[in-house]
Image (cartoon, rainbow, N blue to C red):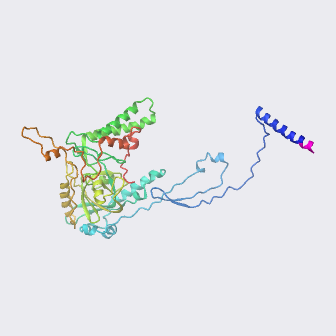
Amino acid sequence: MLVLFAALFAAIVYRWISLERLQRVAPTELPATPTPEPTPTRPPVITGKLDTGKLFNGITLHSTVETIPGADAATERTQPDSYVLDLKLQARVPSPNKTIEELAKVSPQLPTLLPGLASMLSADSVSPLYAQLYDAKIRMLRENLARLDLLLSRHNFFDCQTVLQLQHPQTHRKALLLQADMDVDADGSDADRMPVGTGAPANFKPSTSYRWPKKTSAPNPYLAATEEGLKRAEDEYALATTTPARKRELRNAIAQLRAEVGTLRKYSFLIGATDPFIVVPGAFTHAHDPVKPGDYALVVFGDSVYPAMVGDVGPNDKVGEASLRIAKQINALSTPYNRPVSDLKVTYVIFPGTADQPFGPPDLEKIQARCDTLVKEIGGASVPLHHWENIIPPSPTPSPSPSPSATPSPSSTASTTPSGSLSPTFAFPIGSPAATAQTNPTLAPTSSPAVKRSPTKKRKP
């Protein structure tokens, strides 16, 4: 038995050594094993469990997966209809408020604040602009349906309660009334009044639709950064290594920046942080009784009425926006990224055709007086209009020629303080032009300004 066991052990060891040597000399070749033929089976049945979720923009999502038997995979791979995602967005178009009772449901104080509104309403008061606004929204939904990230959010689709065209029966004063939310416009710059920038939030534009020729030679605080962005775009375009696709992008960027440089050199604009103005959709400026930049307006919220003017024009599919100055007066926590009122409780009353020519720097006392007169023409207001105070730091006055008897006084010393000093009541932090250029994403050195800059005002997050 011992001999047999030793012989068996030796055979096992010898076999193991032989296999190891064989693997080192050449890879082991195994006989091919034929693959068994597949047996016909029924395709798996997928019932498609209903999944209800919320997209980031507030759209309710219902999703299902459906399957049907098909041909072999090689055939189905080439068929466009074999793997299809059908997108169907269902949106309820809201009906506008028409009566004073309906207006009061969202703004209870409105009938009391503006008692003349009731007499201005009629059965056909709803403006065609309301239908045009929602036609624009629906058109944008259809154009962007394949890009869910570009679809209007639920908030922005339902951002308008009504648009009414009104006329007072005695004075015949016309007015356009909107009920909407309030987003924030922080755009604009004016070197004549404020030689430093007010910051550069996302989608910031240094210009507004209301503009006037510059009064002084002071350079716009955003001009240097814009010129620098133009030079970077032109230098990149001139490189031999720039691809044709990139050159097409740069051509658009260069054209846009050249136009912006020329505009900043020639004009001054409203300043969102300091001037009380509102924004209207572009379609409103082409209506039968068009609303134009410079027209006077009232903003009604809570128990207050704020005088304002139309200062900027926005995209056709969004409504409800005011300058940062108005926003912070309504809600001190307002920022370019934080709207003061999310509900549809803000009433905007615009007086078409009331703009004064020629345009010039906003005069807060004149805005107050004109709005006082206009509100009386629609029945008056039960409360005094809010009084705006100028919060722009005073510009330095030129130093008088020195004389032997002149001695500096505290007041003259204060008057020569640089205008960039921060006013204690200023509504928005002021940054230096250099810092603004660095923080403005549209002028980042690593990308084309046109790629980052929104072609239209993207104000509603």
Q: Residue at x 8, y 41 (%)?
A: 406
Q: Residue furthest front?
A: 2
Residue 344 placed where, x, y %?
35, 62
Q: Residue furthest top?
A: 240
Q: Quadrant of residue 381?
A: bottom left
Q: Is residue 140 in view?
A: yes
Q: Nearer the viewer, residue 303 or 110?
A: 303
Q: Quadrant of the N terminus?
A: top right
Residue 7 placed where, x, y %?
90, 40
* Up-down relation of residue 395 to residue 88 (above or below): above
Q: Nearer the viewer, residue 420 or 31?
A: 420
240 left or right, relative to 327? right
Q: Please give the range of residues in magenta.
A: 1-5
34 left or right, relative to 202? right
Residue 26 placed where, x, y %?
77, 33
Residue 152 placed where, x, y %?
42, 55
Does the stretch in magenta take in 12? no
* Up-down relation of residue 191 to residue 170 (above or below): above
Q: Nearer the viewer, residue 283 or 144?
A: 144
13 left or right, relative to 305? right
Q: Residue at x 17, y 58 (%)?
A: 369
Does the stretch in magenta take in 3? yes
